[in-house]
Amino acid sequence: MNAAKMRYSGWALLREGLAGQTGWSPAWHDRDPAPRYDVVIIGGGGHGLATAYYLARTHGITNVAVLEKGWIGGGNTGRNTTIIRSNYFYPESAALYDLSVRLYEGLSRELNYNIMFSQRGMIEVAHSEAELEMMCRGANAMRINGVDIEILDRDEVLRLAPLLNGDLNCRWPVLGGMIQRRAGVARHDAVAWGYARAADSRGVHIIQNCEVTGFEIERGRVVAIETSRGRIAADRFGMAVAGHSSVLAGMAGFALPLQSYTLQAMVSEPVKPCLEVVVASSSHGAYVSQSDKGELVMGGNLDRCPSYAQRGNFPVTQSVVSSLVEMFPSFATLKLMRQWGGIVDTSPDNSPILGPSPVEGLYLNCGWGTGGFKAIPAGGTLFAHILATGRHHPISAPFDLARFASGATIDEAHAGVAH
Amino acid sequence: MQHFPCPWCGNRAEVEFRYAGDAGVQRPTRTADDAAWAQYVHFRRNAKGAAKELWVHSGGCGRWFALSRDTVTHTITGSEPVA
Amino acid sequence: MIPSRRMEQGGAIDRAQRLRFTFDGEAYEGHAGDTVASALLANGVRIVGRSFKYHRPRGIYTAGPEEPSAILDLRLGNRHDPNARATLEPLADGMELRSIHANGTAENDRLGFLDRIARFIPAAFYYKTFMWPNWMAYEHRIRALAGLGRVDLSSRATSAAHRHVQADVCVVGAGPAGLAAALAASTRGKRVMLVEAQGELGGTVLYREAMIDGMPGADWARQAERVLRDRGVEILRRSTALALYDHNVLSIVQKDVAASANDERLWLVRAGRMVVATGAIERPLLFANNDRPGIMLADAALLYTRRYAVKVGNACVVATGNDSAYEVALALRQAGSDVHLIDSRPERDIDPSLAGSMRAAGIKLVPATLVEGAGGHRSVEAVALSNGQRIVSDVVVHSGGWTPSLHLYCHAKGKPSWDAVTGSYRPGSAVAGVDVVGAAAGLWDLDAMLRNATEIGGGKAGEAPSSGTGVRQWTAPTPLPAGKSGKRIWVDLQNDVTIADIKLAVRENFSAVEHLKRYTTIGMGTDQGKTSNVNALAVLAASSGREVAGLGTTTFRPPFVPVSMATIAGSERGELQVPIRRLPAENIHRQEGACFREYGGALRPAWYGADADAIARECIAARGNAVVFDASSLGKIEVIGPQAAALLDFVYYTPMASLAVGRARYGLTLGEAGIVADDGVVLRLAPNHFVVSCSSSHVAWMAAQHEAWRQDRFDLAQVFIHDATAHWATIAISGPASKRIVGELGLGVDLDDARFPHMSVATGRFAGRPARIARVSFTGERGYEIAVPATLGAPLWQKARAAGATPLGIEALGVLRAEKGYIYVGQDTDGETLPHDLGMGGPRAKRQDAYVGDRSLFTPAASKPNRKRLVGILVEGKAPIPVGAHGIELKDGRRRSLGYVTSSYWSAALGHPIALGLIEGGLERASAAIELEHLGQRFTGRLVPPCFLDPKGERLNG
């Protein structure tokens, strides 16, 4: 029961404008769960919806359900600071995140949904010679990995972000930086909605307000799940439930190498365009971009203690804000308008976990930490491959859960690259 | 802006403390297999709700203690010294 | 000149004080006590801005923090606020105000035509177009149309330090309920705090008629204030609660703070109990063109009339479905306006005495009728009623009911519940430590509020103040428009969201509350939906055939009102953002001409002198004569007690228990994942007394690591850790002449090489105080490290200088240690480096006992032959390879990284550049030649053992 959709375009808007905008059909339908699917994806965030889309598009598997305990895109997909980049140190990570950036580049047209991917470039600012040297180490790795990275001198950084504090006598002067020009920001909600619409039109069932309450496991294999809307059976189950990965794993009887923390994000009141690039500083532990609506979108380090509260505390808010007004002194008169928190599942090496779980038939897409949004198209592509074939994609293989026992971790956190 | 009850110093602001993992974890010996060792080094209970956590009063007395804390509501239900 | 709409008498303004200000270049005058909004209204200014999307003319709509439209650029002296809310800003003399979003002025906006193409750009239209060729082709134009005010490039605002206070009870809001709660709470010897957004206590009783304890409400509030002050209650005026955090910590922004450069201060109050008495916010009515200038909320009109003596209009229409607007109608009538009162309720549902008093005052009451639409473009000119009548009017004030302000309660994770009778949310689930009183609790009868608040405050109901001002139906669900007029009805004025937009979203299945909000942007402006959220829910429910109760609420995200980033930063500015650590003898280094840089959070001399050869000169001095180096920031962690040796043996990868008294040993520490965490020298001063000398930037971590394992595995009475780093100043003297120089310091230690060989430690005296002297080397030369009490660092340095040692900065030290292949952990190691990667595999091979990280050294990955290992790298020519260059190989036609250069210098001693690096396979690679790449440049290098000078270590005794 594929649901045909009216194609979105400027012409369609004009036509509908004359007709009172009454001809639009639902972006996706709310389905009731069927008793059985080929594949059930737990989690209706960006990764889950993208996985369903690629299962249908790439692998022709359309008897798929995406279960969402609340509303789609309501977890970290709708709470992050929308940065997309692939400036990672290790080749394994670069392959993964650069696949994602490449998919993002064509995503609006592919989905026929404007996700507003703005490749405005992202600068990481260096405040010391030592930091510049570390950046060169990273930049060279990225260039060898095929990622577009340039090292910028101080003048160039200040030219691209003229409101940065140019005082050489400040606490952390701008000495240079590193830019990925293909990096940028996108409209986070639209990514979820665009994938949902495209998946729905290919027959995927999107089921909101459907919470998983238990796993039915027979001889080490999951055969069905219990949900708030009844039992659902499937050949394979994938979980993409950032913020609740350990909870679901616990339900299925295993533990994960994850710890959940609050990550705050905040926006200022909207102002006219004043920042054309994304700017991050690891010394300051803060990053900022300006949304198309004009708000400064800001974030920083994790809150201090494990939490599922989706609620940030003041010390981290203060540290993010003070960092940004030190970096951009003229931001001091702007007002903070809104602040919120998401739950991020951090892994020991700050790299995601993709692949089989200890329970047969249940597969993992988790541990993205603070960086899941940028990976949605790649995460979806790879997870769809895993769920369709039962085997790893070459790009996902290094991210298997087994790496923690074998010692083959991919430690991006200690590679000198800021997250 | 949580207040944690240090067993020695009483209620103090969360900024004085550092989280140090699950309470009550036993360190395996050298004979542990790769999986058991990885469980110890990398895996976490990561409980949603009632949790028993190891904290250190790093900005105060420096002592380690076990804190019973709800990770959803942030309600504290007790703290005790670790052996 | 009396402004045209200012009434001759009344109000709480000081008519003696005239304040001049400008708006969009025009000069106006107001009075002390005015807000910017009241002064603009008094001057008859109608259009104060343009709407965000359609650039429709907009006027002042409210009198509080919920204002969606009157947002202005404000300048006053050094102060600049690009998005000031006119309704919250007290007027000041000399204020320059400008509209912010118009292209031109608010009156004449060149973008006003956008409203005429509105039908083609409904909510969320941008998701459906701008895809070809890509979004960036359109984005800059769209962005230029968005945003409110402009950042002032020259602004450098700062704020006062935060105040942290504790209270037993903190009452937020000093309306009648808040005052009653504070009065009850303060009788019991408790520390009580009262927080009020306005400059005066009383809330609504300052401008609404109410008798309390037999006196007018405003008098009662003044009396209450005196009582509270006498009882020591701390009263914060002009202070708005922003957010309620975990464990009952409330953030508050206080205005008019003289001690603060931006007039603001942030308070953080931790209270045993929070009493939320934040009142309620009036909801608009929904009718066509309900956004026209001259249309405002009824309560705001009352406030402007009574507090600011503004005659808001000549022909007023008051539209409502509840009793609260009746007093407004009366006040407008008393101000001399012609008043029509349009009530959606039938006559039988209206309190006859209320209706009677209206009619007696000459107000034309029209029951059972809705306002369907407003006429006029730049200002409202008339309204059309559902009974077909058209009323000419220059002002329409309206009340759709009241919405309790539950922001703080919701910040604390309270779950509000829907009250269908009043058509709004009220507190639902109980939240420990948080009580909600008054209108915020959904109470509308003054006596009920006072009784309840008194009880919540800890008093008995009988002690409550009493009013007798009865209210029958203060609030009611917002009546929804019935007909399909085809005209647009605004729900969110700031973000230009209409009922049609909500219906479009529902049609497209964006009907979850959060989806609706995000898709249409309703409630996401600077007012955060204070006037629009509940109306949006009502329209959503009606459009999707559901009950509001089943929709769920949107999340109230802090802060309650936008707050200046300078105020949030507080004192975390400049050097105080992250304070830098300094050496005890910093002044001496300054006198020596040191160039300072920050290393790992400490400010240290990089080199001495301004000449280009400084570093090379220092290197030559070290190898040829002697240098003196301030090593005070190096760790000095004392480990003391019978189990000290056992603890160090566990914490260190390198065994330490076998160290003899009076000797020193270099060693590595690992994390439990086996990764090298620090290196340093351990000194054994006595059988039970060790000193751990770790890297400067790892001191805190190392002290914590020792303390952690001490408490985990050892008898606390048998071993003790003390980080004594800050107590000591340490200078290192190194070079062939160092023995002579140290001898001249007169430390009283026998320096004879036989009795004091390399890696020895002894205690002597300097200036009558203990001095610890260790024979260790960072340079590969004979070296001595002398630690004295911190205050003696400067004299010790001066004495070493007098004896002929040359000052050595960190940069030259980096060269000297690299010549020897001595690593810097964190620079020459990374997040994968295991000890055997550094050529220190001995303990891994030999130790059988437990130590931190032990098992991690034997995973499959730890035993792979092609791990990255420490090597030396030599290149031809005079130019050092840049740090961060990667070794590369071609594999399957692609370049692949083999590792990278971690340290690289010109070696003056050797006359060629040297480098250290981590390279796959290390010296066991098949070929010593390696291709290197740096930002497109290519180099050819040769891998050599990571020691370039004196591999046998003979210079240590030279």
Image (tube, rainbow, N blue to C red):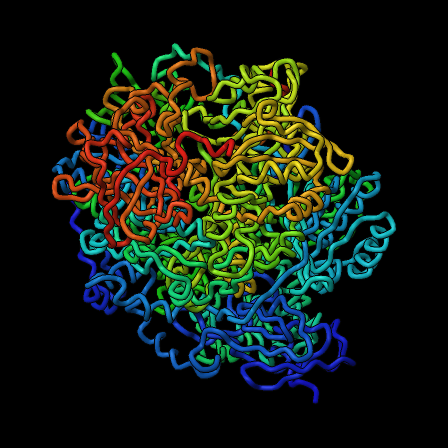
Above or below, comparing residue C28 to residue A412 in the picture: below
**Res. B33 image quadrant:** top left
Quadrant for the C terminus of chain A, please: top left
Q: What residue is shown at x 76% (from left), y 48% (from top)?
A: C180
Q: What residue is shown at x 66% (from left), y 61% (from top)?
A: C264
The reply to whether residue C140 is in sight is yes
Quadrant for the N terminus of chain A, please: top left
**Res. A288 image quadrant:** bottom left
Using residue A204 as the reference point, say whether residue C433 is left or right of it: right
**Res. A344 image quadrant:** top left
Using residue C222 as the reference point, say whether residue C522 is left or right of it: left
Instruction: Name the residue at the right extreme.
Output: C230
Q: Residue C23 at x, y = what percent?
A: 57, 81
How many marks the image carries: the answer is 0
Q: What residue is shown at x 58% (from left), y 75% (from top)?
A: C316
Q: What residue is shown at x 32% (from left), y 60% (from top)?
A: A120
Q: Nearer the viewer, residue C37 or C933?
A: C933
Above or below, comparing residue A22 to residue C873 in the picture: below
Q: Nearer the viewer, residue A391 or B26?
A: B26
The reply to whether residue A287 is in sight is no
Above or below, comparing residue A408 to residue C350 in the picture: above
Q: Residue C628 at x, y = what percent?
A: 59, 44
Using residue C338 as the reference point, say whether residue C214 is left or right of it: right
Q: Residue C143 at x, y = what percent?
A: 36, 67
Q: Nearer the viewer, residue C942 or C477?
A: C942
Q: Residue A231 at x, y = what percent?
A: 29, 24
